[in-house]
Amino acid sequence: VFDHVVRAPEDPILGVTVAYNKDASPVKLNLGVGAYRTEEGKPLVLNVVRRAEQMLVNNSSRVKEYLPIVGLADFNKLSAKLILGADSPAVQENRVTTVQCLSGTGSLRVGAEFLARHYHQRTIYIPQPTWGNHLKIFGLAGLSVKTYRYFCPSTRGLNFQGLLEDLGSAPSGAIVLLHACAHNPTGVDPTPQQWEQIRQLMRSKALLPFFDSAYQGFASGNLDIDAQPIRMFVADGGECFVAQSYAKNMGLYGERVGALSIVCRSADVASRVESQLKLVIRPMYSNPPIHGASIVAMILKDRNMFQEWTIELKAMADRIISMRQKLFDALRSRGTPGDWSHIIKQIGMFTFTGLNSEQVAFMTKEYHIYMTSDGRISMAGLSSRTVPHLADAIHAAVTR
Ligand code: PMP
C-alpha cells in the first residue's frame, strides 16, 4: 500500500552531514551543521553540565515520573528570567507564561500552533534569508508565511531600508519572526539603534514580535547583551513571544531543552494563555523530557554553576571569534580576490561567505569541504589546523 511513496530529499542542512559521513577522505571537513567543536574538532560537553549530571545521578531520591504538561516549574521560571532579565517587570507582574518545549524547534512549533488557533492575524513575516526550518514550522502550523527583506548581498550587511519598507507595508497585527541575536544564516544583526527603530515601527502597526533565541551568549559572549533586543520589546509593556534553545549555549543539542515564553498584558491573560498551551502540547507529546531541563535548572539556580557556565560559554564564543580572524588573515595572505571583511564583521556561529552554489560544489568535490549550498559556513566547526585547508579551497573556488 505504500508503493506510491516517493523518496523525499534530504534536509538541506542535516543532509550535508549525511554526505560528509559518506566521504572517506582524511581531510574532509564538515562546516554544515551549527554545532560547536573544540580546537581538536571534537564535540564539547561543558564541565558544568558534566558536574550537574553527576549531581543528578548521585541524588538517589530522584525519580523518573512524568513532568507536568508545561514541564519543570523551576526550569520555566529560571528560563524566563534568563532571557527577560531577573528584574523584568513582566516577570515580576506574572505576565509571562513559560512552557518547557523540545528545544528551539519545539518551542517555535508550540508557539506557532497556539497562534494559529488563538490569534486573529494568520500571516507571519520571516526574514529573507532565514533558518530553513522556519518556513516549514509556521507553514505546517497553518499560518501564511511571507518574507521581509533582511540581507543585502552587495554589502553583505543588513538591508535595513528594505526591512523597514516590508514591515511598514505588512498588514496590521501581522506576526514578525525576529532572530534575537546571531542571525542564522547571515551573521548580520541590527544595531541597538536599528532595533529601536524596528520596535517603534512594529508597535505603531501592532505587529506581534516572535523572537527566536537560539544563540543567547554566542553573539557577544554575554547573556544579557544578547537578550537586549527582546528586553527592549518587553520593556514597552506590549506582547511578545520568545522561543529559547539551550542546544548551543549549554551544548545540550540532543537533550532537546528549550522554552516558549509568551509575554502578556496581565497575569490573568497569561494564565488563560497557559491553559490553552496545555491543550496544544498534550496531543502532540503529552509532556517534555526531564533530564536536560533538570541540568539547566540546576545550573541556572546555583550561583557558582551559573558563573562557571558563563565562563565556558564565553570561551566558546571567543574561539569562534578567533577563527574569524584566522580565516580572514589566511585569505589576505593568499591574496584571495574580494573584500572578506564580512568574515570578521559577522556575528555568531556562521559566516555567510558569499560563495555561490557552484563554488560550494567545487569545494566539496575538490577539497572535501561540506557546507550548505548558500555558502554558509559554521565557524564553530573550524580549528587552527583546518583554516589553511579552507582558505586554499576558497581561494581556488574564487580564482577558478
Ligand atoms: N532557530 C535557529 C535560528 C537555529 O539556528 C536553530 C538551530 N539550528 C534553531 C532555531 C533550533 O534548534 P534546536 O531545535 O536544536 O534548539
Image (tube, rainbow, N blue to C red):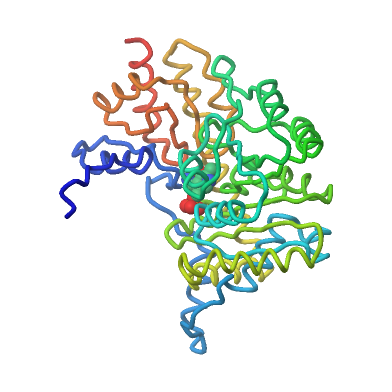
Q: Residue at x 48, y 75 (%)?
A: 54
Q: Residue at x 66, y 44 (%)?
A: 121
Quadrant of the snapshot with the C terminus: top left
- Residue 53 appears at what percent x and percent y? 49, 72
In this view, the residue in front, 85 or 223, is 85
On screen, residue 317 versus residue 240, left or right, reads left
Q: Quadrant of residue 298?
A: bottom right
In this view, the residue in front, 399 or 2, is 2
- Residue 114 appears at what percent x and percent y? 60, 56
On screen, residue 177 above or below 159? below
Q: Residue at x 60, y 30 (%)?
A: 188
On screen, residue 55 above or below 4? below
- Residue 171 appears at what percent x and percent y? 69, 34
On screen, residue 60 versus residue 152, left or right, reads left
- Residue 79 appears at what percent x and percent y? 65, 62
Quadrant of the snapshot with the N terminus: bottom left
Number of marks drawn: 0
Q: Quadrant of residue 207?
A: top right
